[in-house]
Image: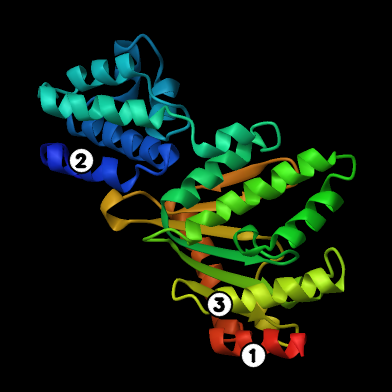
Amino acid sequence: MPAPAHQIDVPTLEYYLAASARSPVALRMVLGNLLRTLRKAAGIEAEAAGDFIHGSEAKISRMERAQVACKHDDVMSLLTLYGVFDDNIRGHFAEMVRISRQPGWWHRFEGVLPDWCGKLIGLQEAASVIRTYEVQLVPGLLQTPAYTEALVRQAYPQASQEEIDYRVVLRKLRQNVLAREEAPRLWALLDEAVLHRPMGGEQILREQLRHLVTMAQLDHVTIQIAPFNRPGSIAAGFPITHLRFDEGLELPDVVYLEQLQAAEYLDKQEETQRYRRVLDGLAHASLTPKESVDFLNDLLD
């Protein structure tokens, strides 16, 4: 949880603004946590807070869980209710509201981006560690453009070339998160089956494998292969993405589970810890990062 109410000062708020500036989604989570902290410190129930802003307990819950973007007037009214009158602090809250309501860069791809996927991009932009496990496909952040195009063609057989190109550009832009300064740490676990599925043909797959070898050389990228001959590496039969954030933001871990036409975001500690243990077990049972690079090179040879 964020700092207690008496510690929510201007420097703290400035840190939150700077640390989550890349992601309105993350700032929305920070803002929701702050409002929950202030409400509880003031000893006010969610129902009473909802009544105060002519809303409901459910609205307060959605605001605090970052399921909706907070409105300026609602936040200012809640700060008054919670006893926050300092103009400087209220001004920083207003700035947090303004930024958290801005669309992320990915919103211009709304025509091809599922509604439930935008939140993942925003969380990845703010994450300090991204752990991902894949059983069928190369993780999106590690795909080559040719691999992505082949995947899009298979997933959307009726799509025009323009739409296909648009989706490939979107994927490429998402990968920029790994190229920036202070990039997140990416830890990717790949089932061996991923490496044998010739998406787009053998040549595209070979280029993709070479790209994995190249990416694995980066200090902030770790790749591990879960081979067929290690039964302990079959702890999950579906993709898992686990995100952690800068400790200073004090945001809960988030687990992303993607389905065919929807996705689930888990942030309760008991849930995220369970998936973290699964990923830890998979990593322990998989090849080491060095062994994994050797494995990839052997496949290429």
Q: Amino acid at mark 2?
A: Glu
What residue sits right under mark 1 in the picture? 294
Instruction: Tell me which numbered mark, 2 or 1, is placed earlier along the sequence.
Output: 2
In this picture the colour scheme is rainbow
The reply to whether dot 2 and dot 1 touch (C-beta < 8 Å) is: no
Q: Position of residue 10 (x, y in %)?
A: 13, 37
Q: Residue at x 34, y 44 (%)?
A: 20
Q: Residue at x 83, y 65 (%)?
A: 199
Closest to the observer, 110 or 25 = 110
Q: Amino acid at mark 1?
A: Asp
What residue sits right under mark 3 in the picture? 216
Q: Position of residue 211 (x, y in %)?
A: 65, 73
Residue 14: which numbered mark, if any?
Answer: 2
Closest to the observer, 66 or 95 = 95
Instruction: Tell me which numbered mark, 2 or 3, is placed earlier along the sequence.
Output: 2
Is label 1 in a helix, a strand or a loop? helix
Answer with the quarter of the image where residue 50 lies. Answer: top left
Q: Amino acid at mark 3?
A: Ala
